[in-house]
Image: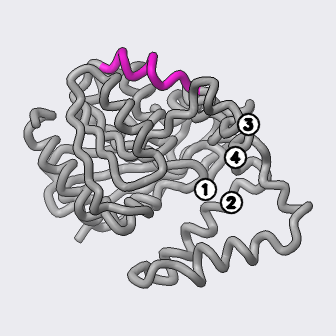
Amino acid sequence: MANTGRGYIDNAEGQLHVWSWEGARPDHSPLICLPPVPFGGRFFDRFARAYEGPVWSADLPGYGFSDALANEPTVAEFTCAMSPLLATSSTPVWLTGFHSGALVAIDMAHCFPEQVAGLVLVDVPVFTGPDMASLRESLTVPPQYLTQEDPLNGLFQSMVVDRLADVPFDRAFALFIDFISAGEHRNAGYHAAATYEVEAACEQVEKPTLVIATQSSLREGTLQTADWIPNATLVERDDVTAPAFERGAEVIATLVSDFVINDGRS
């Protein structure tokens, strides 16, 4: 069982709120997990407890308890703000990213290659291209909570009251709090993901990369990502359904552990 810790580290914008899990095997390859907007680092709690080695994550700037960026975020700015996480390990780390966090992982590998051992990308969003224009636009619209009739009660109903049977109340409630914590800025991170040139970034990846495609709405983009990244290892898991890091945390942890133990050799 992994022991969970919390703390803060400084960055150029102020501070990052950091989550850490010791793991039963401190000699196992360390991971840094990049969360999906609008959730924080504790999004990976179930996965981190299943992985045997040390794991760190942090709330993205403007989400959870991390200080916000001065400007509207981009993936590059998220990368810069999250980079102090790399100093938590004395050896190169494996970056694990889910959804929008996968794009930050790709960008961090470009910017800090000497500190990154490899990548694990789970369900990668690809919102570029003319056929995605309407989706990109919808993703960037603020929630407009004040114009809705009782919006938080509806979210609470869907995320907490109607949660999966095997998700404890405390876990569902924590994710609900993370989901609404950024207020009207909740979708700013989606805009960062929607405007990131994923294909061009993937084609430059030089690190060993495991791409995991679960049974999700991001499946097509994830398969494209695996094609774009030179020598990527693709694993398709139709048995893992949304939410992947709740229902499939143990499966994903095993896949990641096996991959990093072999230094990215499938």
Question: In the visual, does 61 lie left or right of 27?
Answer: right
Residue at point 39% right, 20% down? Answer: 110
User: In terms of sequence position, does the residue under pointer 4 or pointer 2 come before the other?
Assistant: 2
Name the residue beneath numbered marker 3.
137
* First-in-chain label (1 vs 4): 1
Which picture quadrant has residue 87?
Answer: top left
Q: Is residue 201 magenta?
A: yes
Amino acid on which disc 1 is placed = Gly
Which is more foreground, mark 3 or mark 4? 3
- Residue that label 4 marks: 187
How many dots with numbers?
4
- Magenta segment, principal secondary structure? helix
In this rendering, position of residue 157 left or right of residue 52? right
Say which of marks 2 and 3 sits in front.
3
Residue linked to disc 2: 181
What kind of residue is marked 4?
Answer: Asn
Is 8 on the left-hand or right-hand side of 118? right
- Give the numbered dot on residue 64: 1
Residue at 62 percent across and 75 percent down: it is: 158
Q: Which residues are magenta?
A: 196-205
Q: Residue at x 55, y 56 (%)?
A: 39
Closer to us: 181 or 142: 142
